[in-house]
Image (cartoon, rainbow, N blue to C red):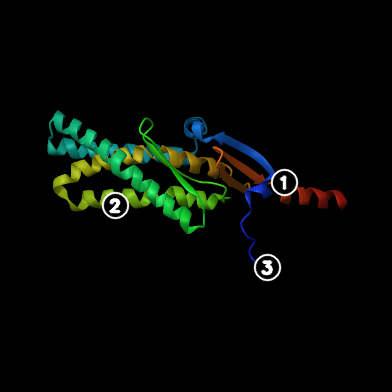
Amino acid sequence: MSPMRSRFDPAELGDRSRFRLIDEYLHADIIIFFKHHYFQQRGWIIYLHVLLTFIALAYWSLAGIYAGYPLLTWIVTAGWSIIIMAVIILPSHALIQYWIYRAIGAPLTRFYYSFRHIYALVLSYDFVFYPREIFVVSIVPLLLLNLSIASAAAVWESTRFYFLALLAINIGSESKEFAVMNYYWKKRNRKLYSYNCSTGKSYIFEDISRSNSQQESVGSS
């Protein structure tokens, strides 16, 4: 059995005979990247997110209608949920991502938080990621937090309406994660590597060495 190849260094991705740059974006423009791959490059992952959001909202609405809550309760519950998500859930989401980055060996990590767009972002600099690691970073916090909120709604009946509202709003706010997964899923047949530069830019490269070697073998046969 051959030894496992060590992780690529970002400088190695600059070898044009082996890698091709297919995407790049400024961290300041990351919202544009998310919106493009959520609204304009839709796939089944995006439709799944829309469906999950609709189901969560419908379940919350049915719970409120069944309980006969007045309009003021709905407004207070929605406002409470948005505040809890912004103050507790988003930082918790980012913290889980941080520990995942640390677990896979990412050396330098930074937090970004936006009240305007209601998102928290964790970026690890000058460290090459594989697509499967991007999926793990996207899925694990999503599952852990939503399962925790859903469990709380199931256990505490007196506050179920509040937790269901929090669940619906939290699922709806996770479009960023679904946009990232949608991007990599659509390119799943390509061997990709990505890294974030400390200068404020992200790069995604495709490994073309295999296709080049295949072309050379065809040409020499």
Q: Along the line of sight, which residue is nearer the eye, 186 or 82?
A: 82
> As displayed, is residue 101 above or below residue 49?
below
Q: Residue at x 34, y 48 (%)?
A: 92
Q: CA distance from mark 1 to mark 2?
A: 45 Å
Q: Nearer the viewer, residue 146 or 82?
A: 82
Q: Which residue is mark 3?
A: 2
Question: Which residue type carries mark 1?
Answer: Asp
State the quadrant of the N terminus.
bottom right
Residue 104: where, in percent of width, then height? 50, 57
* Residue at the spot 75% in from the left edge and 46% down from the top edge: 17
Q: Residues within 10 Å of mark 1 (few under 14, many from 20)?
A: few
Q: Are marks 3 and 2 in contact (CB under 8 Å)?
A: no
Tell me the element at label 1.
loop
User: Which dot marks residue 15?
Assistant: 1
Residue 217 at what x, y percent from top left?
Answer: 82, 52
Task: Say whether disc 3 or disc 1 marks the residue closer to the N-terminus.
Answer: 3
| SS for dot 3 | loop
Say whether marks 3 and 1 touch (CB < 8 Å): no
Q: Nearer the viewer, residue 20 or 29?
A: 29
Amino acid carrying mark 3 in the image? Ser
Measured from the top left, where is residue 47 in percent x and y? Answer: 43, 37
Q: Which of the pair 11/157 is nearer the observer?
A: 11
Q: Earlier in the sequence, mark 3 or mark 2?
A: 3
Mark 3 to mark 1 CA distance (whole Å): 24 Å
Give residue 86's position: percent from left, percent from top. Answer: 31, 38
* Label 2: which secondary element: helix
- Residue found at x 63% / y 48%: 10
Q: Residues within 10 Å of mark 2 (few under 14, many from 20)?
A: few
Specify the label residue 148 is tagged with.
2
